[in-house]
């Protein structure tokens, strides 16, 4: 998986699913019409037809759960969704940047420290949010490197 593929928009995911499985199968999975499967797969910048896909609805649900203090349940749901993908694929999806585990762990500390500095400085929420994700990505790389090392 390339970096661009890891940041696909919901419509892109449905576009891939529609091409891979066919619109009828995608529609059947969600108990919706074939037209809905086509609509979910449309680039919103190129169409006037706009409806929220199941991924967008889940995103909204998880966002709202997190906002009212139930982010732990939203994260548990996301971990459940991750079980649909072969674990080897999930581990391999994280690009391994550092050569050694020690370098990976040091990168974790640096990312978490940057997050802490932003929080302490009262940076705007979008900045803190981005740093949170950067720290989580660093930790995911460390975890992936650890898993790969144990599989060998």
Image (cartoon, rainbow, N blue to C red):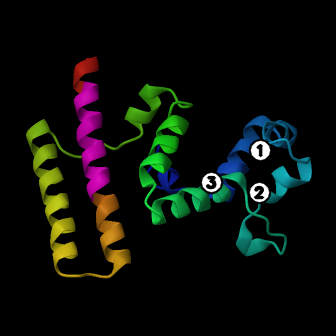
Label placed on residue 18: 1
Residue positioned 44% across, 27% down in the render = 87
Q: Main secondary structure of the magenta part?
A: helix
Residue positioned 42% across, 49% down in the render = 72
Secondary structure under badge 2? helix
Name the one closer to the observer, 152 or 61: 61
The answer to whether the residue labelled 1 contacts the one labelled 2, judged by CB atoms less than 8 Å apart, is: yes
Indicate which disc, 3 or 1, sits on the residue closer to the N terminus.
1
The answer to whether the residue labelled 2 contacts the one labelled 3, judged by CB atoms less than 8 Å apart, is: no
Which region shows up in magenta? 135-148
Q: Is residue 116 magenta?
A: no
Which of the 4 quarters of the picture holds residue 98? top left
Indicate which disc, 2 or 3, sits on the residue closer to the N terminus.
2
Residue positioned 15% across, 40% down in the render = 99
Spot occupied by residue 63 in the image (x, y as percentages of width and height)? 52, 62
Does 17 sit left or right of 128 as displayed? right
The number of numbered badges drawn on the structure is: 3
Query: Which residue is labeled 2 in the image?
Result: 40
Q: Which mark's residue is nearer the viewer, 1 or 2?
A: 2
Gap between marks 1 and 2 measured at Cα? 9 Å
Q: Which mark's residue is nearer the viewer, 3 or 1?
A: 3
Query: Which residue is labeled 3 in the image?
Result: 58
Name the one closer to the observer, 12 or 140: 140
Gap between marks 2 and 3 measured at Cα? 14 Å
């Amino acid at each position: 998986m390339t970096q661009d593929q890891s940041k696909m928009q919901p419509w892109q995911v449905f576009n891939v699913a529609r091409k891979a499985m066919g619109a009828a199968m995608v529609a059947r999975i969600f108990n919706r019409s074939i037209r809905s499967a086509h609509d979910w797969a449309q680039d919103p910048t190129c169409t006037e037809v706009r409806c929220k896909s199941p991924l967008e609805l889940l995103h909204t649900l998880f966002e709202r759960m997190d906002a009212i203090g139930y982010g732990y349940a939203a994260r548990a749901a996301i971990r459940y969704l991750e079980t649909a993908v072969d674990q080897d694929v999930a581990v391999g999806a994280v690009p391994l940047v550092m050569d050694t585990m020690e370098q990976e762990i040091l990168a974790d500390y640096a990312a978490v420290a940057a997050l802490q500095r932003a929080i302490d400085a009262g940076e705007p929420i979008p900045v803190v949010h981005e740093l949170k994700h950067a720290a989580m990505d660093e930790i995911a790389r460390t975890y992936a490197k650890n898993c790969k090392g144990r599989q060998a």
